[in-house]
Image (cartoon, helix red, strand yellow):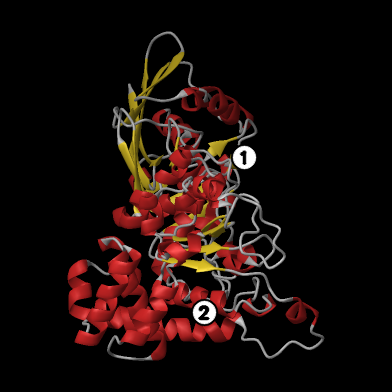
Amino acid sequence: MSLAVVHSRAQVGIEALPVTVEVHLANGLPSLSIVGLPEAAVKESKDRVRSALLTARFEFPARRITINLAPADLPKEGGRFDLPIAIGILAASKQIRSKNLDRFEFIGELALTGKLRPVGGALTAALQTRTEGRTLILPTSNADEAALATGVTVMGSGHLLEVTAHLRDGDTLKPHSIKLPDNSVSDGPDLSDVVGQHHAKRALEIAAAGGHSLLFIGPPGTGKTMLASRLPGILPPMDDEEALENAAIQSIAGKGFSLSMWKQRPFRSPHHTASAVALVGGGSHPRPGEISLAHGGVLFLDELPEFDRRVLEVLREPLESGSINISRAARQVEFPARFQLVAAMNPCPCGYLGDASGRCHCTPDRIRSYRWRVSGPLLDRIDMHVEVPTVPRDQLLRKKAPRIETSAIVQQRVEAARRRQLTRSGCANHALTNKQIEKICVLDDASRQFLDQAMTRLGLSARAYHRVIKVARTIADLAGDQDLVTAHLGEALQYRCLDRTTSLH
């Protein structure tokens, strides 16, 4: 009787949970069984492992082989357990030494030739391996991604024979290290490309400084999508923790993580036909959706009323909490979803309401029905509603455009305002609690009276009231002002156009 124990990791949501691969060889008719709640791809690993071992000129034991993936109640999926199973069989059959196996963790899928193929979730596995103080051995294709985790030894290998040689000799595989690219200067779309729209650019700067959600409303071709796509370029650069979180989500999403995207804020723009599962994530083995893939960056929803209303309603909770919980019969999975929502919509079904050419012939009932596709509670959670009018023809045809600020210049102001917020309250203004608002956003008598009148005339809800104050606080931070005054509140109210009844006519 022979027994070998090998350590590995299962991917469950954003976590890489420990799995102990126990391989037991006993006398009896030759057979191989895998227990421990394996799904189909894991059960098929016995055929991949057998062929890989034989191709690599190892002996496949003609004995009764039992493989247990513990804990037994944790679902296991994919081909990530091929390598630890192969190592376990070799150790149990005394073809390699087993005394040092406890120092390592293994993940990787085996080809029939013995080559190692990449798996998802390499970065999360490396982060969890660090806590155990072990060395992670995985496919070479995953090594760059896993090496993003500092404080853990990562070794990449291209073939099963390289892994067994290292376990035998102890020095054939070298710790993998990478040089992180310098992505501090964004080469994405620049704000200077947008002609005119000074009011919308100002709103975009305020949204970036305070992390506020934003809705652009205007006719087709006025630059709503151009403005939204330039928001990542003026947001403050990612710190290391944010970058690791975002890279971990990209890693488990199925396509892996590219080093070229290190510290680049994501910009996700799902089509309006996207389902609720595509947006929030899900599946029998939950995967992150668009709102989690936009974590730390921007989620842009173009043609907002064209989205299914039930799909849009799933945004309400993550907008408040910054995470999304997906419940299944066996377990619950939580994905981070701290994204900045930017949406765009036309003012009416034809898109030309308020246009000087008079092309719009939509009736008030059609306009009202069109706007009611987006629920009031969701609109109430969007901090800023900004009109984007048609750009005058003379601005578009002007031979020499006036000096326009670049994204780099605007980003400097945004960074300065965000530093003031983090120093003062430890979070961006959009995340202020009601108690923090009472402490930080103190209003004098004149400002309080002005805001009281605005609430009465516009019919603002309590949530909208707090959002106006948060936006006003960001405006003050951009100006470097310590106290809130009426001018800050007045500008903040300008960015609530859907609350002004005149905008419905």
- Give how far across and how far down residue 484 sits, in percent: 29, 85
Q: Name the image quarter holding the N terminus.
A: top left
Quadrant of res 38:
top left
- Image point (50%, 23%), residue name: 46
Q: Which label belongs to residue 115?
A: 1
Three-letter amino acid code at disc 1? Answer: Lys
In the structure shown, which secondary structural element does the residue marked by tag 2 occupy?
helix
**Residue 487 placed where, x, y %?**
37, 86
Q: Specify few, some or many for label 2: CA neighbours under 10 Å numbering under 14, 14-19, or 20 or more.
A: few
Q: Is residue 130 left or right of residue 385?
A: left
Residue at 60 percent across and 43 percent down: it is 159
Q: Is residue 428 visible?
A: no
Q: Tell me the CA gap for discs 2 and 1.
A: 54 Å
> Would you name the residue on which mark 2 appears?
202
Up-down relation of residue 415 to residue 311 (above or below):
below
Q: Secondary structure at mark 1?
A: loop
Frontmost residue, 336 versus 461: 461
